[in-house]
Amino acid sequence: MNLELLEGSAAIAEAAIVAGCRFFAGYPMSPFTGLLEEMSRRMPAAGGVCLNAESEIEGVNMALGAAAAGARAATGSCGQGIALMQEAIAEAALNETPFVVFNLARNQQDYFQATRGGGWGDYRTITLAPKDVPEAVEHTQLLFHLADKHRAPVMLYGDPLLAQTRVGVDIHPVDHGELPPKDWALDGTGGGTGRSRQVWTWAMGKATDPGPGPDGHWRAVAEKFDRIAGLEARHEQSGVADAETVVVAFGSAAKFVEHVVDELRAEGRRIGWFRPVTLWPFPGDALEEATRTAKRVLVFELNAGQMLDDVRMHAADRRAVRFIGGVSIAESGLSYGPLLDAPVIRQRILEAT
């Protein structure tokens, strides 16, 4: 293992380049700005391109264009900027154009945005929520693979802790297996042959080589996301087999919850934790099994209760679900507030049990 001390944004940038990303575009907005700066520093030496776009809308459409040409491409912002990208993300999902979106959010209030989306049409966005920088490095490479595997835009849900924490990481290429050829890419090789390609959902079935038509294409895309839901759900759990209380949390908050729950369990309390690694697909079957014997299912997230909906849908007994999180934002509005603190989380768990 060759550890290198890097800030989270630098580690994610390096992992993206190692994964083959050669095009990146974005508009500065904290805490995403650090990733954009790191990409601008590192991408030229890798033979790639990084552009500071005039807005998030330009940035995401640049990434969409590069991806349509066959490049491994990415963009990003925080939640406010991702909101501006929703139309293009939906277009990419329906056009089956793969790229990665890095949401280095300011808190955990973008869960609905990441898992429900704000674009048009029947699509979802595979979303991984790493709990720390080393896992963000792993997830970055995995997301580029999943994007190409499923021909879909995918998302990494991070936050200021991931972006701005400096830790030792080992960044090396990871082989996630074979991928289908990009024989759909608009690389110019079909020009003048009568076999030109297009990446536009409205035109499916209207080109020289007829396809399924818009209705057939959209049906196929919807079926694809149904298949993805059954293939890509990921989670972690500990201590749930005999737990009377299971605490569910995601992202950076989950790391704090894991620490507190492990302490409580060491004190003899029958308590466990469950973490959805993928926010979509949500690991509902695994959560149902993990909470089958629990008397209480506690949800800790730093918002007004968003993942709470998914936990209620999938817990073995929805009546056992209780919310112990809440909105908690720093005075600057750019990071977490006082609820993201181990003693506070401990107190909230104990009060609920």
Image (cartoon, rainbow, N blue to C red):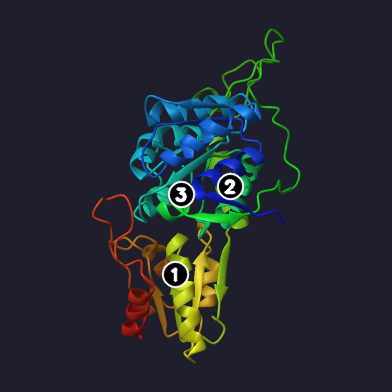
Q: How far apart are marks 2 and 1 (CA)?
A: 22 Å
Mark 3 to mark 1: distance in Å? 17 Å
Return the disc, 3 or 1, that comes first in the chain's sequence. 3
Query: Mark 1 is on which residue type?
Result: Phe
Q: How far apart are marks 2 and 3 (CA)?
A: 13 Å
Q: In this view, does 155 lie above or below 24?
A: below
Residue 266 x, y percent position in the rendering: 51, 87
Q: Position of residue 82 (x, y in %)?
A: 39, 40
Q: Name the residue under label 2.
A: 140
Task: Find disc 1 in the rendering and name its residue.
Answer: 256
- Determine the secondary structure under disc 1: helix
Do the residues under discs 2 and 1 have CB atoms within 8 angstroms? no
* Residue that mark 3 sits on: 163
> Which residue appears farthest toward the front when viewing the image?
5
Q: Is mark 2 on a helix, strand or loop?
A: helix
Furthest residue in direction right, as rendered: 178
- Indicate the quadrant containing the C terminus: top left, top right, bottom left or bottom right: bottom left
